[in-house]
Amino acid sequence: MRSVKEYTETVTANVGKVIIGKDEVIRQVITCFLAKGHVLLEDLPGTGKTMLLRAFARTIGGDFKRIQFTPDLLPSDLTGISFYNQKEGEFVFRRGPVFCNVLLADEINRATPRTQSALLEAMEEKQVTVDGTTYGLDEPFFVMGTQNPLESYGTFPLPEAQLDRFFMKLSMGYMERKQETDVLGRKDAKDIISQLEQKVNIEDMKQAMEEIENVTVSADVESYLMDIIEATRNHPSLSAGVSVRGSLALYKAAQICAAMEGRNYVIPEDVKKEALYVLPHRIFLSAGNHADNVQIIERILNDTKVPLENV
């Protein structure tokens, strides 16, 4: 029986054997996982996105699948197909790669909107519908979509509704010089992953999720959270602020952040920290405005009064 703090430390340390110097990114991936959400990782090729998720899946003992998204990828390539089995004389459903615990949707914006929408049902409803029959997905089911921020040719940008369904948008970035130097002389990451041990199980995850439900949020902190949300909806540089789904995500992320620190109550710093990961991809700039989404959220956080007592 592990607490959320122990769960986080165990998973972070194990994944950190593969992904050097990115403990905060790993913690936020764990946050998305415990929140039963999904993560969008936008970064340059070769920064370790696939290795991160492979190491995470191995650490939690989850079934891992990777799908390379391309313009000719069909919804059935994700969900599976029904085919006629002549030997048995009936239609049989062949499950697609979406039936797993941890799914890497690599370069998700290269698939057509039709295929993106098929993944959307799986992410939101934890099920897929094929030929009128609904099939439930495995539990847990966690998706990490990736995007390359530099290449736009041949891509289909994710619509606002789908962006909003990602719990967080993260970026790994380059390693520091010393960290990258250390990596140069070590074993190949694939070999390290193959030797990783499973450190937690489904029961640990369930225990952690139950603990999160017991984390309390005071009226003052709730009011502070809503001040931030409403500020995005009234900001002159934005055409649309954070949705209700976004405010719920921030609330849950703050609870998990508190639990990771060993507390059973949320403080304003938890909300402020998680807002930088949960909110930027949920706001939309006004026409002609070229500001940075993260900078706008930072300004809103700086301008929003923080409650100092009774938190």
Image (cartoon, rainbow, N blue to C red):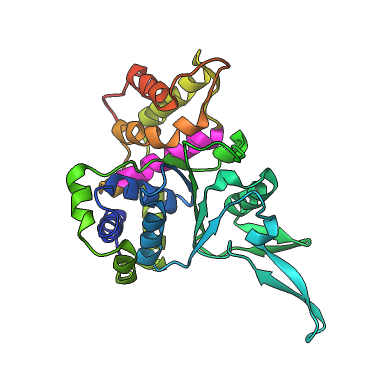
Q: Is residue 59 left or right of residue 10?
A: right
Look at 38% across and 49% down and name the residue there.
46
Q: Is residue 136 left or right of residue 68?
A: right
Residue 113 in sight: yes
Q: Position of residue 293 (x, y in %)?
A: 44, 26
Q: Position of residue 3 (x, y in %)?
A: 29, 58
Residue 264 in sight: no
In the image, residue 9 sits, relative to residue 203, either above or below, namely above
In the image, residue 244 sits, relative to residue 252, either above or below, namely above
In the image, residue 157 sits, relative to residue 288, either above or below, namely below
Residue 247 is inside the magenta segment = yes
In the image, residue 152 sits, relative to residue 63, either above or below, namely above
Residue 251 is inside the magenta segment = yes
Principal SS element in the magenta part?
A: helix
Image quadrant containing the N terminus: bottom left
Look at 42% across and 67% down and name the residue there.
202
Look at 28% across and 55% down and name the residue there.
12
Look at 65% across and 61% down and name the residue there.
77
- Quarter of image, res 208: bottom left
Residue segment shown in magenta: 244-259
Image quadrant containing the C terminus: top left
Q: Is residue 116 left or right of residue 152?
A: right
